[in-house]
Image (cartoon, grey):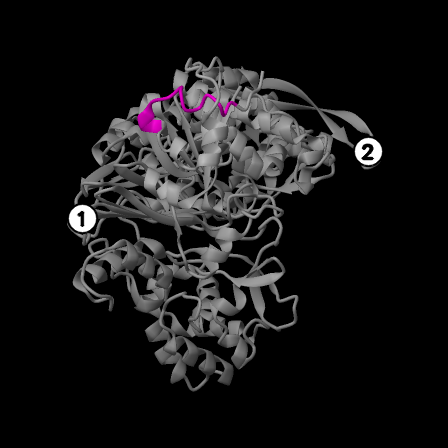
Amino acid sequence: MLSLNLRSSCTQRPIRALGWICLLSLPFLLSACGGDDDSSPPSHAYHATLRYTAYGAPHIEAVDFKGAGYAYGYAFAKDNVCLYSEELVTLRGERSRYFGEAGTYFGQLFGETLNNVDSDFFYKLLFTESLVEQQKTRLSQDAQDITSGFVAGYNRYLREAGSSGLPEECRDEAWVQPMTEQDAYWRYMQLAMIGSSISFINEIGSAQPPLAASVARSVRAEGLADATDTWSNSQALKRIAHFRERSIGSNSYGFGRDVTESGKGLVMGSLHFPWWGSLRLHQVHMRVTSRDYDVYGATLLGVPLPLVGFNDQIAWMHTFSTDNRFTLRMLSLDPANPKRYIKDGVSIPLSEMPLKITAKAANGALREISRTLYMSEYGPLLTDPEGGLVWNSQIAFAIQDANLANYKIIDQVILNGLASDVAGLRVAGATHSAMPWANTIATDRKGDVLYGNFSVAANVHDLQLAAGACVPGQEQGLPFFDLMNTLGTVVMTGATSQCDWSGYIDGSLRPWVIRSDYVLNANDSHWWPNLQIFLAGYPKIIATGPYAEGQVQGERTRAGHAIVRDRLSGADGLAGSQFTLANLQEIFLQARFFHAEEWLPDFTAACLTSPTASEAARDACAVLDGWEKKHGLTHSGAILFQEFYAKLGRLADPKWWAIPYSVSDPLETPKGAASIAEAMALFEQLVADPQFNSPQKRRVRPADVQILLRDGRPLSIPGGAYTFNNWNGQKMLDPFGSGNYIYTADPSTNLGAYGNSYIQFVTWDNAGPIAEGLLTYGQSAHPSSPHFSDQTKRYATGEWVKLPYTEAQISAELTGGPIVLSE
């Protein structure tokens, strides 16, 4: 039975928690708190209070996690029901039924095209009732309660809205269905595997044995160089490489009492996820009074409590980590049968998994499609013949994913939110080590800071990764040892039990440090969290190849450390020599481009004096020579260098640098321009391109070309594709005829945009947390909502939104409620 129980709301919870409700306004007091004297507690499974502050942020209070999940599920559905309903169709393996067997959709992270049929078979294979039961039985009661509450609240919204009351994008659509708890648990697992198995949807969903084993091409027969080239073309591995190349990630600082003007902690974080699709973030403030849980933050769609955020004592953010969460397994097949593999000299059959999906044909008729997929003891088989993942008479490949058995995600998130200082957060992180793909950066009120990588890494020992051990190399005529050391991808043999692994690296073996000055992570490894601190000696699987300990650091990491160095020395031109919330925000918006500072002066000097440079090239070099080396909205030259930087492969090749990288000086090396003639040839190509073939085009500013349409009007979006203040859009010729190439996104879905998503700056005063930030694309995924673009408009002007936490802050920003929800 449903009820909107306003009348009893002031009698069922402690005065400490609810006194503010009955004092907000007399009219609401009379409707919400008047009436009979029944003071008995409600006999409802779910019960919570919901309020709203500016920009549609929900503030939820409940006695227990059931009630909190219920109110959040309800609030969440109002903002995201269409987008999330489609994701539930995906999870259930029903895309072909509702969107057609010939249909495709864009993958969660990179916009890669996935076809509905392969996707449905992928989810039918891995997302089973058994997976749900294994997860559920390992979760605490709190985690189960918030899940059941979230599902019930989501479904309540569907019932109240009715099919015809939904937003236009999904109004009266048959694919909008109530959520089940099974769906909720599948969503947790899907999110856990976005950096692993989810990147192989097409390759797993379509994997089939060879029709004729004798004609299948063998990787073994190729030369090593050819095989390596083939593997580098794998579309699946290119998706994984996007993580490793720091295209998708986050930035975060934790500043401690030694470097802040107030002597209290200060945290800054910016999550870089797509602005479109099911990896959108959503803001929520949740109080669970019986557990002293009180957290404001942001979460991914379908996760029923904040993943990042702050409470009254601590603030934390996550960044994407370098851990290998999976290994590919090369199976040596039985010569007599490509559906069997040899391990320890014994022939073992693959498990055949007959599956069926329902698909809609072009004429609208439904038909059944059957396909048999295959599982090994390690995990599902996959194929990508163009990229070396073959299944022939000799070998096949499977994926072993540590996050497929990561059942403690929600418990980990609850523990994080209950921490009261960074020492407690470190203990919480190491308890389960269940954050599936994230570093943790945190600071507390007293001014301590934490960097910790308590992410999931496959439980592979260093000896198993040694040359000649479990990663086949040149001695076997295979490229996998070289691939591990160049790309970081780990491919292990499945032919011997000596190479077996299970589970993930224990929390006691994870890297962390607590300090009182600062820590930083910008998607490089754990190795260098502070100018003076180097964390070494940890399991190799945490950071392999170019991300291993001691390797050259990325642009955002180097820029981040340079920002601290220059702030503390007073060399950045700002007042003082310590950090405040205000100057940190100013520094963030400057979007400093450190690689440009270190490389570009030598190049422009050579270009401007070159007797062979074209007039266009010299003009472009004059632009770059006068550029401030920042990607601010008004900085002419930022777009020109952004494209040149991409053309140079982001200066990753050592040949571009005059002074090579030194492990003893990771901030100032590599440095200076080399291979200038080769770089000039690329630059001439660039300035001849239609994007830069006129003086006006070479001088465009980010404000001119980083554009999103909102309410039919263009907004200039700050941030650079490669800088600490990070944003990028789809490049296209301006459809409005300016002649410029612009960086934009679909105005109704945001498809094509990624980068800064949820940004928070948090510190404390004597009254509690002081927090400002943005959810850059707004709370709602529905274009008809006022909260689809309200925060985007603030973002475009460089303004920040208050994140209200204390009762005084909430009251000052209150726009709706309290509403008491019960069922």
> Which stretch is magenta?
5-17
Could you classify mark 2 by the number of other residues whose Cα lies within 10 Å: few (under 14), some (14-19), or many (20 or more)?
few
Furthest residue toward right: 363
Residue 510 vertical position relative to residue 229 in the rendered view, above or below: above
User: In the image, which disc is placed on residue 517?
Assistant: 1
Q: Earlier in the sequence, mark 1 or mark 2?
A: 2
Residue 758 image offset from top left, x and y in percent: 43, 46
Q: Which residue is identified by label 2?
A: 364
Q: Nearer the viewer, residue 518 or 169?
A: 169
Residue type, label 2 = Gly
Is 662 one of the magenta-colored residues?
Answer: no
Comparing labels 1 and 2, the label whose residue is closer to the camera: 1
The answer to whether residue 543 shows anywhere in this view is: no
- Relative to 321, 112 lies left or right: right
Residue at 40 percent across and 31 percent down: it is 22
The answer to whether residue 388 shows anywhere in this view is: yes
- Relative to 774, 517 lies left or right: left
Q: Nearer the viewer, residue 262 or 8?
A: 8
Residue 774 image offset from top left, x and y in percent: 42, 49
Quadrant of residue 162 within the rendered picture: top right
Furthest residue toward bottom: 611
Residue 803 vertical position relative to residue 158 in the rendered view, above or below: below
The N terminus lies in quadrant: top right
Residue 817 vertical position relative to residue 569 in the rendered view, above or below: above
Residue type, label 1 = Asp
User: In the image, which disc is placed on residue 534?
Assistant: none
Magenta region, mostly helix, strand or loop? loop
Q: Are marks 1 and 2 in contact (CB under 8 Å)?
A: no
Could you classify mark 1 by the number of other residues whose Cα lies within 10 Å: few (under 14), some (14-19), or many (20 or more)?
some
Furthest residue toward left: 258
Secondary element at image label 2: loop
